[in-house]
């Protein structure tokens, strides 16, 4: 073996010893486990179908019918768990994992808050037109049934001025009575127009005294008429499902998001709205609050 070859072999062995052969520098295996239950804060019952995500990312898991969940292969460290479930307020929990099994019990507050996005209403041509909405369930329906709360109508049959009115005002097969507020004022810019992001983060119907009085605050049978895009105002209206006689009362709000004329379907006017409903009588409309 030559002198140069011996020297090269010595250098290789030295570098290997310093870099890759010391097992003490290898990353620790991800042996941690996070498991437990998510329960209703009032009843204590387990909540199924709660989506749980972690930051830093581990995996997204969903609770089973008993509220149980498990996350495996968790590295040591500090994590934020975010819990989401329709009808409940989002919740965040902060915890640390140290190569062990961490048992946690978490809870969510039931707010009865439901969010229905991108609901497409179609100009009324006949009773089969999808021009009505069941605001309680967030479903677009036609007027051949009576399970609806609101209609999209052409104010004068001119396909120019449109408005949303109470379901009980239909000539045939009347739906439920809905009472509307006047247009809500945007607290961020003191105007009556909103962006989609501003509506999404709108947390309440701001009244003079901060409280909701259905009789006082919902006085309209319809909203003011508006023209199709590009002149449609992006406004927000609150409503009370008076005709459903619910206890506690169901209140909500909707955002006039976008409109267009469908030239393929008889030049029909289409309106896209976003709806937030609180079935628990609470003046609370931000699912992230």
Image (spheres, helix red, strand yellow):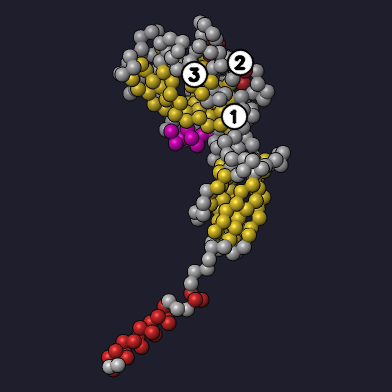
N-terminal of the pair, mark 1 or mark 3, is 3
> Could you say which disc has been placed on residue 243 in the image?
2
Is residue 94 in view? no
- Span of residues in magenta: 196-206
Image position of 208 with respect to 40: above or below: above
Q: CA distance from mark 2 to mark 1?
A: 16 Å
Q: Could you say which is closer to the camera, residue 6 or residue 170?
A: 6
Name the mark on residue 182. Answer: none
**Element marked by disc 3:** strand
Q: Check if mark 2's residue and mark 3's residue have beta carbons within 8 Å.
A: no
Residue on which disc 3 sits: 141
> Looking at the image, which residue is at 43% across and 82% down?
17
For disc 1, the neighbor class at 10 Å (few under 14, some 14 to 19, many from 20) is: many
User: Would residue 153 be found to the left or right of residue 239 on screen?
Assistant: left
Residue 214 visible at all? yes
Looking at the image, residue 206 sits to the left or right of residue 4; the answer is: right
Residue pointed to by mark 1: 278
Q: Residue furthest toward the top?
A: 171
Examine the structure image and report whether residue 270 is included in the region drawn in magenta: no
């Amino acid at each position: 073996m030559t002198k140069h070859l011996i020297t090269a072999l010595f250098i290789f062995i030295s570098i290997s010893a310093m870099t890759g052969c010391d097992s003490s520098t290898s990353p620790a295996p991800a042996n941690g486990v996070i498991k437990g239950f998510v329960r209703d804060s009032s009843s204590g019952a387990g909540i199924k179908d709660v989506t749980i995500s972690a930051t830093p990312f581990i995996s997204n898991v969903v609770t089973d019918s008993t509220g149980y969940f498990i996350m495996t292969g968790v590295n040591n460290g500090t994590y934020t768990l975010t819990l989401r479930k329709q009808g409940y307020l989002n919740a965040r929990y902060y915890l640390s994992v140290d190569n062990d099994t961490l048992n946690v019990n978490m809870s969510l507050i039931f707010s009865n808050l439901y969010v229905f996005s991108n609901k497409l209403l179609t100009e009324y041509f006949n009773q089969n037109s999808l021009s009505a909405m069941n605001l309680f369930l967030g479903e677009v329906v036609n007027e051949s049934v009576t399970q609806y709360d609101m209609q999209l109508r052409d104010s004068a049959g001119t396909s120019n001025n449109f408005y949303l009115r109470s379901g009980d005002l239909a000539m045939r097969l009347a739906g439920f009575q809905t009472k509307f507020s006047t247009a809500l004022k945007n607290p961020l810019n003191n105007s009556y127009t909103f962006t989609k992001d501003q509506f999404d983060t709108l947390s309440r119907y701001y009244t003079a005294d901060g409280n909701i009085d259905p009789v006082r605050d919902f006085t309209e049978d319809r909203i003011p008429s508006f023209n199709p895009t590009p002149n449609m105002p992006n406004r927000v209206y609150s409503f009370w499902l008076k005709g459903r006689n619910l206890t506690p009362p169901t209140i909500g709000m909707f955002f006039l998001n976008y409109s267009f004329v469908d030239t393929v379907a008889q030049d029909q006017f289409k309106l896209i709205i976003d709806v937030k409903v609180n079935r628990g009588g609470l003046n609370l409309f931000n699912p992230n609050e």
